Image: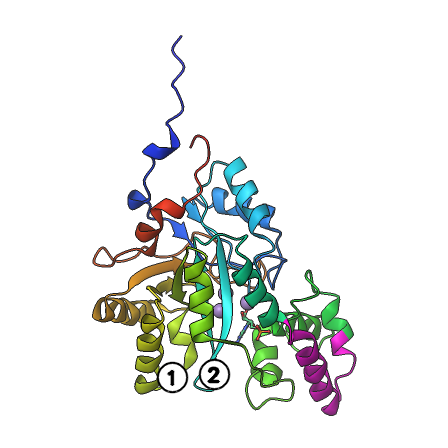
Amino acid sequence: MNTPLPIPSRAHTVSVVSNADLHCHSTLSDGTLTPEALAQRAVANGVALWALTDHDEVGGQQRALDAALALGLPYLTGVEISVSFAGRVVHIVGLGFDHHNTALIEGLHATRGGREQRARDMAAGLAQVGIHGTFEGALTFVGNPELISRTHFARFLVEAGHCHDVNEVFRRYLTEGKPGYVEHRWARLGDAVRWIREAGGAAVIAHPARYAFTPTEEYALITEFMAHGGQGIEVVTGSHSAAEAVKYAQTALEFDLFASRGSDFHSPEESRVDLGRLDGLSGRLKPIWQVLEHRVHWPACV
Ligand code: AMP
Ligand code: MN
Ligand code: MN
Ligand code: MN
């Protein structure tokens, strides 16, 4: 009997991949599933190219990579960096970098640095409106002590009965002008893009529709991002409506940016869009994973 030989890895090509999911979160940041559970879920949902993109943290990359390859799932390294730009927080996704790169690791470490003090200040703000013990409460939801986030506060406030779901917590307590919101200085745009690029990866503007920028501010973001060497923009994401995806497909074409696609999955209970369960990119767009062909980690046989 003839057993088919495994296809050599160099014969693989990402240009045929359509179900790429290049944005999601694990217990290393504010997701509720481990990197291993996410890899299994990605495979079960038909994802053909995957990246785990924890906030300001690459500590889960080796686990995600090992789990993906063991399941026959091609993998790109990933991260989502918090950046301060024009008085707002912008997220920059990095893909296909060397996750052992020292400058990237140190830059992310510094970016995570202020989170504990920020969380204490958030708790003080919430105490002023009569909600006590939220720092300790949020910590019970934290998987990575360096990455206490607003999401962990939101989960605690739901558990404690203050709100029905995390969206309501954000709306009432955790967004600008609300009692638990604390201004914070995140990474600079140029630094975030440089860390990613110098580690061999590509930088992507995450969920551009979420920033509520004026057209002038958005133009400044995109042009400054590109001037620093940024190459991509998320078009189809769990954080965009269908209309927003159409709008940012146009933006990608206008600025000649590569397009990215990712669910931004955080949790089976909270996320609207599951891993791999989102619309395809329009055929007119250039997928970001085409420039990352040489950065894909391929399983020994697919
Ligand atoms: P942080 O980095 O601590 O400011 O937390 C930001 C995270 O909060 C985002 O990555 C989302 O996961 C979550 N988030 C932000 N806004 C909302 C919202 N309106 N509803 C639910 N989750 C949100
Ligand atoms: Mn998040
Ligand atoms: Mn984000
Ligand atoms: Mn995200």
State yes or no: discs 1 and 2 in contact (Cβ < 8 Å): yes
Q: Quadrant of ligand 1?
A: bottom right
| Ligand 3 contact, mark 1 (Cβ < 8 Å) | no
Question: For the residue carrying disc 1, how many other residues have a C-alpha within 10 Å: few (<14), some (14-19), or many (20+)?
Answer: some
Q: Position of residue 295 (x, y in %)?
A: 40, 47
Magenta stretch bounds: 113-135
User: Is residue 122 on the magenta stretch?
Assistant: yes
Specify which label sits upstream in the sequence, 1 or 2.
Answer: 2
Amino acid type of the residue that numbered disc 1 sits on in the rendered structure = Phe
Q: Please name the residue that numbered disc 2 is placed on.
A: 88
Q: Is mark 2 on a helix, strand or loop?
A: strand
| Ligand 1 contact, mark 2 (Cβ < 8 Å) | no
Q: Please name the residue that numbered disc 1 is placed on.
A: 213
Q: Where is residue 188 in the image (x, y as percent from the top left)?
A: 48, 76
The majority secondary structure of the magenta stretch comes to: helix
Q: In front: 58, or 301? A: 58
Q: In which quarter of the image is the N terminus?
A: top left
Question: For the residue carrying disc 2, how many other residues have a C-alpha within 10 Å: few (<14), some (14-19), or many (20+)?
Answer: some
Q: Position of residue 293 (x, y in %)?
A: 34, 46
Q: How many labels does the image show?
A: 2
| Residue 160 position by quadrant | bottom right
| Residue 108 position by quadrant | bottom right
Q: In front: 204, or 131? A: 204
Q: Which residue is located at x 34 percent, y 64 percent? A: 232
Is residue 188 something one can see in this rendering? yes
Q: Position of residue 27 (x, y in %)?
A: 63, 58
Amino acid type of the residue that numbered disc 2 sits on in the rendered structure = Arg
Q: Residue reaching furthest top? A: 1
